[in-house]
Image (cartoon, grey):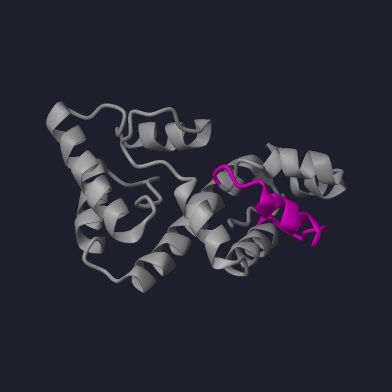
Amino acid sequence: MITINELNAMSEERFIDALKDVFEHSPWVAETAYKSAPFASTEALHRTMMDAVRGAAEETVLALFRAHPDLATRLAISELSTAEQQGVGLDRLTPEEFETFSTLNREYVNKFGFPFLFAVRGKTKDDILVAMRRRIPRTFAEEREQALLEIERITGFRLRDLIDDGAGAAP
């Protein structure tokens, strides 16, 4: 862990390097946030990063969504995504479960053009399946907003795991 004060004292290059993986394969979020340093807390940093995402061009936001892996994929994915998915057993699916996830992932991507995003921490594979089935019938606008909320949760967990702001504030 690093402290919020250590993060605030970093050069732009070190700051971006320290936070580049928080938003999946999207170091531009850390680069944009750096311009608002210093941060009073991890929560303030997270708010700034999410404001950067919400203020980005639509194609940039969709690229961020698309940078995330499908859940329960057997393809190579980032270390953070791997750890998160292992935490809920998505790396230990039966062949039947894997096929169910694969089918739902394909259906979701075909409809929305980006992978199903879900903050898996504290959830079970059954929770994820229920959410997938509930969300596939939604509109694009509803799912775009839900995807942003899920990214906010995922990145909040990641920042909290990375930064100690001394106040116990959760992003």
- Where is residue 126 shown, x and y percent of the image? 20, 46
Query: Magenta region: which residues?
Result: 24-42
Residue at image x 25%, y 42%?
A: 125
Residue 133 position, x and y percent, is 19, 57
| Residue at 77%, 44% in the rendered image | 15
The quadrant of the image that shows the C terminus is bottom right
Furthest residue toward left: 96
Q: Nearer the viewer, residue 77 or 149?
A: 77
Q: Residue at x 46, y 49 (%)?
A: 66
Q: Is residue 121 left or right of residue 44?
A: left
Is residue 146 visible in the rendered image? The answer is yes
Which picture quadrant has residue 19? top right
Residue located at (46% from left, 32% from top): 77
Assess whether residue 79 is covered by the magenta stretch.
no
Q: Quadrant of the N terminus?
A: top right
Residue 99 in the figure: left or right of residue 155:
left
In the image, is residue 170 above or below residue 84? below
Report which quarter residue 40 is drawn in: bottom right
Left or right: residue 83 compared with residue 8: left
